[in-house]
Image (cartoon, rainbow, N blue to C red):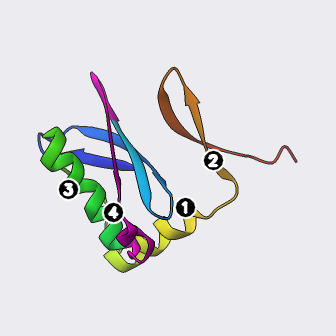
Amino acid sequence: MLVRLDDGDLASLTVIREPTQFFAQLRSYGFTEHASASSPALTEMQTGAFLDTVASVFSIFRDRPFAYIIADGMSRADWLAAMEEKAHDPRFGLMERDGEISYCMTVPVN
């Protein structure tokens, strides 16, 4: 997903969420940063709280505060529902290349 850094630049945020841990990559022109955390609390955490936790890890430990970009006219609840749906969409996957993680999407040929 796209996020906006505190200096106004755009960055790409990729998150891999497991039941009790997550790995995240924040990437923009000129830098790629990684963060991770593990906690049993992640098992019960709702999507909004989880994404706020991801943001706080980068803000505190990487000094790269950012804000999630929500489209005009879309409520936070609708945006969170869309993020949840995308996270479980089997067409989307993650691909690692040269130490960087990126989303890929399977597109039908027909």
Residue of label 2: 93
Residue of label 4: 51
Q: Residues within 10 Å of mark 2 (few under 14, many from 20)?
A: few
Callout 1, which amino acid? Ala
Residue found at the far right of this picture = 110
Please check the rendered image and state whether residue 31 is part of the magenta-colored stretch, yes or no.
yes
Callout 4, which amino acid? Leu
CA separation, marks 1 and 4? 12 Å
> Is disc 2 placed on a helix, strand or loop?
strand
Please check the rendered image and state whether residue 54 is part of the magenta-colored stretch, yes or no.
no
Residue of label 3: 56
CA separation, marks 1 and 2? 9 Å
> Is disc 4 placed on a helix, strand or loop?
helix
Residue of label 1: 87
Q: Residues within 10 Å of mark 4 (few under 14, many from 20)?
A: some
User: Residue 80 is drawn in which quadrant?
Assistant: bottom left
User: Who's the residue at 64% across and 62% down the image?
Assistant: 89
Callout 2, which amino acid? Gly
Residues in magenta, as a range: 27-47
CA separation, marks 3 and 2? 25 Å
* For marks 4 and 2 on the same chain, the one whose residue lies earlier in the sequence: 4
Callout 3, which amino acid? Ser
* For marks 3 and 2 on the same chain, the one whose residue lies earlier in the sequence: 3
- Position in image of residue 54 (x %, y %): 30, 56
Decide: is 32 above or below 90: above
CA separation, marks 4 and 2? 19 Å
Disc number lying in front (3 or 2): 3
